Image (cartoon, rainbow, N blue to C red):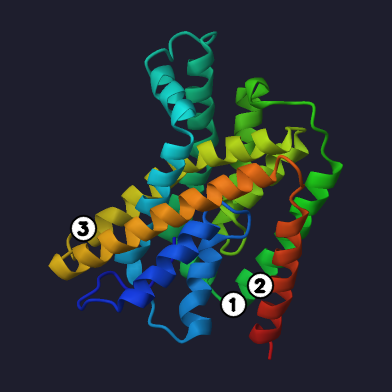
Amino acid sequence: MAHIQIGVTAPMPILHLVLVAIVQGITEFLPISSSGHLILLPNLAGLEDQGLVIDVAVHVGTLGAVILYFRHDVTRAIDGLLHLGDPTHPNARLALGLIVATIPVVLAGLLLKLSGYDESLRSIAVVGWATLIFGIVLYWADQRGTQDKTATDWSLSHAFIMGLWQVIALIPGTSRSGITITGARQLGYERGDAARLAMLMSIPTILASGTLIGVEVAATMDASAAKDSAIAALFAFAAALASLHFMMRLLQSVSFTPYVIYRVALGIVLLAIAYA
């Protein structure tokens, strides 16, 4: 998630709220990095940083969107939690896989936050390099990877490997969805199911990070911040739902190359700005 201010003491302009929410909603699940865009927004658009309260709100909105879109899989995973004692139960395997895939990024995120190095990574140069490099890595994995596996082939070992890929997303600009899709494609998962697994992995990850930062901002919430948060969450929800629908439909006919082209172009522009 993005950073800086812990609370918001005055109402934010509605256009600013909508802009932040739409950027978050569109980029959270497309493989182009939501955190990178949210960090860049105040730097490049000359806007005041939105603060942690709004960051939490827009992540709540996108969380609601992915849960709604993949509601059948979410229902299966919840049911699987009740059958964890039966490793042969298909829903239990899904639930356990999501747990295993989430552990690496939660542990790495806590270590990074406690060390204080998370703030040092938030620069236009870092975002630019991560956007460019991991865009190329996505292209490599997408073009090289086979498509002989589906979501039903997801094993605990593959869940752990994808979880390790997800750790890299702690670098702003990497894209959590992009790097987990990269891991899935490298393992040979079909494009649509690679995206589906990446989206399902986002649910516990967003819950974990949102809870961690939500504790920080809870004490600073007031009526104004609550109203701003509700507006931001609503617009982020709508934008994320539309973005998910667009990407999953598009993957039926094209590869991830359009996203790679965008990432490479954006990365070059960002690096030009950073080193100007």
Please tell me which residue is depicted at 63% across the width and 40% down the height of the picture. Answer: 195
Element at badge 2? helix
The tag on residue 124 is 1
The amino acid type found where label 2 is placed reads Gly
Residue with the mark numbered 3 = 218
Percent of width and height locating residue 170: 54, 56
The amino acid type found where label 3 is placed reads Ala
The correct choice, above or below, for 252 with respect to 13 in the image is above
Horizontal placement of 147 versus 69: left or right?
A: right
Element at badge 3? helix
* 250 or 123: nearer the viewer: 250
* 79 or 69: nearer the viewer: 69
* 256 or 85: nearer the viewer: 256
The amino acid type found where label 1 is placed reads Ile
Q: Give whichever of discs 3 and 1 has the lower sequence position.
A: 1
**Total number of numbered labels?**
3
Percent of width and height locating residue 145: 82, 39
Please tell me which residue is depicted at 66% across the width and 72% down the height of the picture. Answer: 128
Percent of width and height locating residue 244: 54, 47
Which quadrant would the N terminus be assigned to in this image?
bottom left
Please tell me which residue is depicted at 21% across the width and 67% down the height of the picture. Answer: 225
Percent of width and height locating residue 130: 66, 65
The correct choice, above or below, for 23 with respect to 14 in the image is above
Q: CA distance from mark 3 to mark 1?
A: 29 Å
